[in-house]
Image (spheres, grey):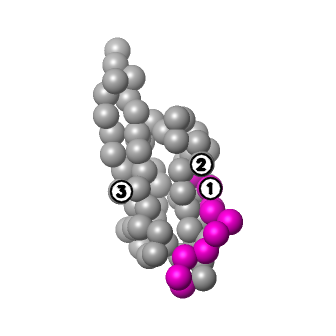
Amino acid sequence: MAKVRGAVVVDTEACKGCSVCVVSCPKNVLQLNKQVNSRGYNYSYMANADECIGCGNCGLVCPDSVITVYRAKE
């Protein structure tokens, strides 16, 4: 069985740091950044990129639809 690897792309300028995506991630891939965007929000980012399985939970629960999830088989 091929291993599925995922990647999460967050529109950092549109992210308002609600952390719903952080809580929904089963592999604890996402975290809120200590830096802020131009609007003053701590945006989410892939802190543990190697653990991402591309499940898409983060993209589904994002209230502003600023997350895109990519999947690739290895």
Q: Amino acid at mark 2?
A: Ala
- Residue 63 drawn at (x, y percent): 45, 71
State the residue at coordinates (40%, 56%).
9
Residue 31's disc number: 1
Along the viewing direction, whichever of 57 and 39 lies nearer the viewer: 39
Instruction: Report, in whole angstroms, how far the alpha carbon at label 3 lies from the one at label 2.
Output: 16 Å
Q: Is residue 70 toward the left or the right of residue 25 in the image?
A: left
Along the viewing direction, whichever of 62 and 10 lies nearer the viewer: 10
Q: Is residue 31 magenta?
A: yes
- Residue 49 drawn at (x, y percent): 52, 41
> Where, by quadrant of the figure, is residue 42 drawn?
bottom right
Disc 3 is placed on an element classified as strand
Vertical position of residue 74 compared to residue 68: above or below:
above
Q: Amino acid at mark 3?
A: Thr
Q: Main secondary structure of the magenta part?
A: strand
**Among numbered discs 1 and 2, the one appearing first in the sequence:** 1
Q: Label 2, on which residue?
A: 47
> Where, by quadrant of the figure, is residue 20 drawn?
bottom right
Instruction: Report, in whole angstroms, how far the alpha carbon at label 1 lies from the one at label 2.
Output: 6 Å
Q: Label 3, on which residue?
A: 68
Q: Which residues are magenta?
A: 30-39
Q: Residue furthest top?
A: 1
Q: Is residue 57 magenta?
A: no
Residue 63 seen in the figure: no
State the residue at coordinates (61%, 74%).
36
Mark 2 residue crowding within 10 angstroms, few (<14) / some (14–19) / many (20+) = some
